Image (tube, rainbow, N blue to C red):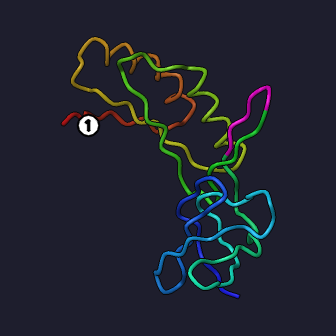
Amino acid sequence: MMIGRVIASFGRHVTVEASDGKLVLCRPRAKKNQCVVGDWVEWTATEDEGTIEKVVQRKNLFYRQDEIRTKSFAANVDQLLVWIAAEPEFSENQLARALIAAKAQGIEAIIVLNKLDLGANFDRAWTRLLPYQAMGYTVLAISASP
């Protein structure tokens, strides 16, 4: 049995990076795929693919939840960048949900406000983020236009 890290997940397949750096397409042994990007897994090689035998204990699990279901999408996260824009206007509800999810898992969150070049729109968005700065969140201002 080998140990590897999940670097991509799509449907019932995951891509595992083996200890030698080789990328291997793997399928979970169980019917439901419990792997997410960032998981460390124990896996066995087959002829041209691999089989996930076990997910190693996680440091944390980042997920979103609504009234209907919970969707896990990353594990063993060290830091979260919450990337928002000055225009279109960002959703405070979604920002708060991301920050709460990160806090619940002990993940450091940094807010990145894009579109510094938009003048008044940027200034309005920056003002809306002042309470987050007061709470101790790092807020970065950038302009990532081509």
Q: Nearer the viewer, residue 57 or 69?
A: 69
Relative placement, left or right, of 137 versus 101 is left
Tell me where residue 146 appears, x and y as whole percent.
18, 37
Residue drawn at (54%, 43%) of the image: 109
* Residue 69 in the image, given as x and y percentages of width and height: 78, 35
**Furthest residue toward front:** 47
Q: Is residue 73 left or right of residue 79?
A: right
Q: What residue did someone put label 1 on?
A: 144
- Quadrant in the picture for residue 97: top right
Residue displayed at 35% across by 18% down: 87
User: Residue 11 magenta-drawn?
Assistant: no
How many marks are shown on the rendered structure?
1
Residue 42 drawn above or below residue 119: below
Q: Is residue 5 above or below residue 1?
A: above
Q: On the rendered structure, is 42 left or right of 135?
A: right
What residue appears at the point 61 percent right and 35 percent down from the top-left corner?
Answer: 99
Q: Name the one closer to the observer, 125 or 63.
A: 63
Which quarter of the figure is the N terminus placed in? bottom right
Q: Is residue 73 above or below residue 20?
A: above
Circle 1 crowding by C-alpha within 10 Å: few under 14, some 14–19, many from 20: few
Where is residue 110 drawn, in percent x and y? Answer: 48, 41
Which of these two is toward me, 23 or 58? 23
Q: Position of residue 92 (x, y in %)?
A: 55, 20
Q: Tell me where the magenta segment starts and ends, as one range.
A: 63-68
Farthest-out residue, left: 146
Residue 29 occupies quadrant: bottom right
Write the residue at 70% across / 78% down. 42
| SS for dot 1 | loop
Mark 1: amino acid: Ala
**Relative to 120, residue 74 above or below:** below
